[in-house]
Image (tube, grey):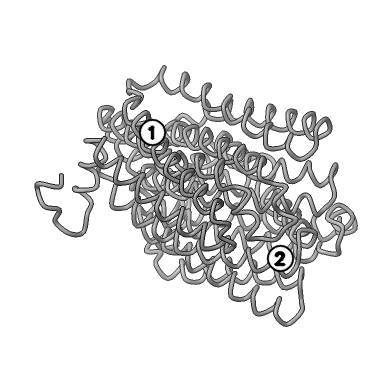
Amino acid sequence: MRIGQTSFIVFISKLGGSAIGFLATIYFARVLGAEVLGYFALALALVTWLTVPSGAGVVGVGAAMKKRMSEGTDSGEYLTASLLIVGAVTVAIVSTVILLGDYVDAYVGRPVASFVAGLLAVQVISEFTRDILSGEQKVHISGLLTPVKISGQSLTKLGLVVLGFELTGLLIGHAAGGLLVGIVGLYFVSSEIARPRREHFESLFEYARFSWLSGLKNKSFDDVDVLVLGVFVPSALVGVYSVAWSIATFLTLFDTAVSSAVFPELSKADAEDSRQIVSKLVNDSLTYGGLIVIPGLFGSLILGERLLRVYGPEFTQGATVLWILVFASLLYGYQKQLMNALNAVDRPDLAFRINLLFIAANVVLNVVLIAAIGYVGAAIATAISAGFGMVVSFFVLRALLSFSIPHGEIVRQFLAAGLMAGIVTAGLRAFEAIEFGYNIIVLLTLVSVGAGVYFVTLYGLSTEFRSTVVANSPVRIPQRLR
């Protein structure tokens, strides 16, 4: 797997930062409660959706810039053209949020409109900077910015919450981390500002008119359920749901790292008309897309209630939601790899149509199921729409590329996870039999043992996984262990 080292660097970077955020969220949940976290989740959901305005929006232009810069020609011109477009669109959206501030405040339930406007500007700066680095094929640097961002956010939030600022502290802290990423990331940008020509703008818009919906699709998967929940359920339940989502998202770090590392390589191979390499990279991305989420699904079924208990007693009601969201994340992870390939081979038109279907299904299912059965319906709607999107994405990409589904590798990952689940279940029953009362020790012990069993078993079962570990290991592994 040629992109193994890059994927691992991105993954470790995201893991370090997310671990800090994970611990910080536990503290905020125990100190502030589910209701305040619910207000915070609704404000962030608004921000993330507002970064995808109609037409050739911020996310669409960022994706187009990343694609065109990765092709290796006129990088400075594409950077400048994108900067002009994104700047103008962002100013317009921020101004609109300020003008409609009363409606924003009424929806969230707290006076947060000015924070939403500021967070929107900061998030655009952060995402745009990372798109530049990805376009320059500096995915490893872009990945290293994740712990910088989350650490900055978490530390600032902690300080402000300790001082008693509660929701305001969470919002200001979130903005601080994003701004830090923008500043640090710009230091590593090597492309220089250059005067763009009309064809550079036209090329960006040609790609962005389709790719912006891909960004909307990502926001739809992450946040449409939270936005709809804000209409139908109390803020406290939104907070419980958002905590379950944060755990599921934590498990998707590796598949996100894989797609980030694969995209520039896919784009370059496609530009060189190396279809065999493109097919191999698609196969690799599917092989490793569920590497972490598959055991995470088993773990969430067995330990979900105990894990949520760490956040506080009121969060344990989200145990069912948790495993459904992890399952949805697994399906969406595979869809993400397929859609990543579609965009990389310069077929944003097909990705556009798939994304349109995905978004429509997700929105409709969320409204119907949340209204019918409450916040569990949001998780079910997300899982169904992710499965639908995965199937459609597969057939569309299969019509363009000849690639194989790594059935054997995926089955071996499930087998290793199944063995892990059996041992973890036995360990849990042993702890319960002796009435061991320290929940955090039980969790840490079982998660550590489970992870060890999973990876050791997979290393023994899978020649592909074994070869990947050997090829990308920083130390030489003795022949007898291969």
The residue carrying pointer 2 sits among few (fewer than 14), some (14 to 19) or many (20 or more) residues within 10 Å by Cα, namely some
Left/right placement of residue 365 relative to residue 199 reads right
Q: Quadrant of the C terminus?
A: top left
Q: Amino acid at mark 2?
A: Gly
Q: Is residue 104 above or below residue 207?
A: below
Q: Nearer the viewer, mark 2 or mark 1?
A: 1
Image point (39%, 59%), residue name: 12
Image point (68%, 59%), residue name: 120
The residue that disc 1 covers is 286
Left/right placement of residue 255 relative to residue 281 reads right
Q: Earlier in the sequence, mark 2 or mark 1?
A: 2
Foreground pick, 67 / 116 = 116
Left/right placement of residue 61 relative to residue 371 reads left
Left/right placement of residue 73 relative to residue 297 reads left
Q: Quadrant of the N terminus?
A: top left
Residue 329 rendering spot, x and y as whole percentages: 55, 39
Residue 415 rendering spot, x and y as whole percentages: 37, 32
Q: Marks 2 and 1, how far apart in space?
A: 38 Å
Foreground pick, 80 / 416 = 416
Q: Is residue 24 above or below residue 42?
A: below
Tag 2's secondary structure? helix
- Location of residue 365 by image quarter: top right
The residue that disc 2 covers is 118
- Location of residue 308 by image quarter: bottom right
Tag 1's secondary structure? helix
Foreground pick, 312 / 36 = 312
Residue 342 rendering spot, x and y as whole percentages: 44, 31
